Image (tube, helix red, strand yellow):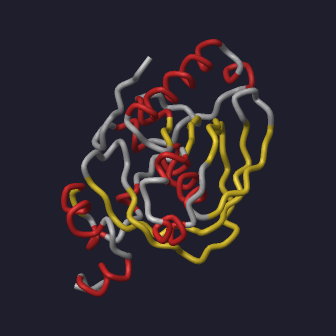
Amino acid sequence: MKLDIVQVGEAVLRRRARPLSRDEILSPAIEELIASMRETMHVAPGVGLAAPQVGVPLQLAVIEDRAEYIERLTEEQARERDRRPVPFQVIVNPVCVIEDPAPREFFEGCLSLAGFTAIVPRARRVRVECLNEKAERITIEAEGWYARIMQHEIDHLNGIVYIDRMHSRSFCGAANFERLWKDRSVADLWNEVPFEP
């Protein structure tokens, strides 16, 4: 069942979500929530969705970066973003450890801030310790765009939205992004829009 995605301004997006117990993770209610979140993410479409984004204050997110999304990019764009397909996965009660703190800057959007985008610096490589949908402890090593998705979704679980981390001078509407910046590099933007006002 497709769920409604809440938009920035809703308090649930600004509060730390609560962890789930093993019994909760294995319950039919959470199984149904995961299935609905997956469907909602696909319909949107998006590459990740955190439970607070559907109004549920739980430490749970779904992630999937499908090959068909990456095929829309040029080879150069996919390489610049270090983007490869990521199979569907569920992360519960995640803890993110930065493995390579050197920031990588790219435009980022959010299903809870529809119609906008901005450049957000993110760590290139992270390690995520979490539980999966079977309540099994797992470790995920993510780099490139995958690491960006992980950081974005885990931020949601901690009441953080990308606008809290963005370079505010890069903030723009989706239509202007498509028209002006979609096929250009981040360096192009900083050449035309000075970093300092």
In the rendered view of the protein, which quadrant contains the N terminus? top left
Instruction: Using the rendered view, name the quadrant where residue 162 is placed.
Output: bottom left
Q: Position of residue 143 (x, y in %)?
A: 64, 63
Q: Which residue is nearer to you in this view: 51 or 44?
A: 44
Q: Is residue 196 left or right of residue 31?
A: left
Instruction: Using the rendered view, name the quadrant where residue 23 is placed.
Output: top right
Determine the residue positioned at 45% across, 41% down.
15
Determine the residue positioned at 76% across, 29% down.
135
Q: Position of residue 81 (x, y in %)?
A: 51, 67
Q: Position of residue 42 (x, y in %)?
A: 45, 33
Q: Position of residue 129 (x, y in %)?
A: 74, 48
Q: Is residue 18 above or below residue 105?
A: above
Q: How many marks?
A: 0
Residue lying farthest to the top in this orientation: 28
In the rendered view of the protein, which quadrant contains the C terminus? bottom left
Determine the residue positioned at 71% across, 34% down.
132
Q: Which residue is nearer to you in this view: 26 or 13?
A: 26
Determine the residue positioned at 45% across, 46% down.
159
Q: Is residue 100 left or right of residue 118?
A: right
Q: Which residue is nearer to you in this view: 195 or 185?
A: 185
Q: Which residue is nearer to you in this view: 137 or 125?
A: 125
Q: Is residue 91 above or below residue 115?
A: above
Q: Is residue 119 above or below residue 186?
A: above
Residue lying farthest to the right in this orientation: 137
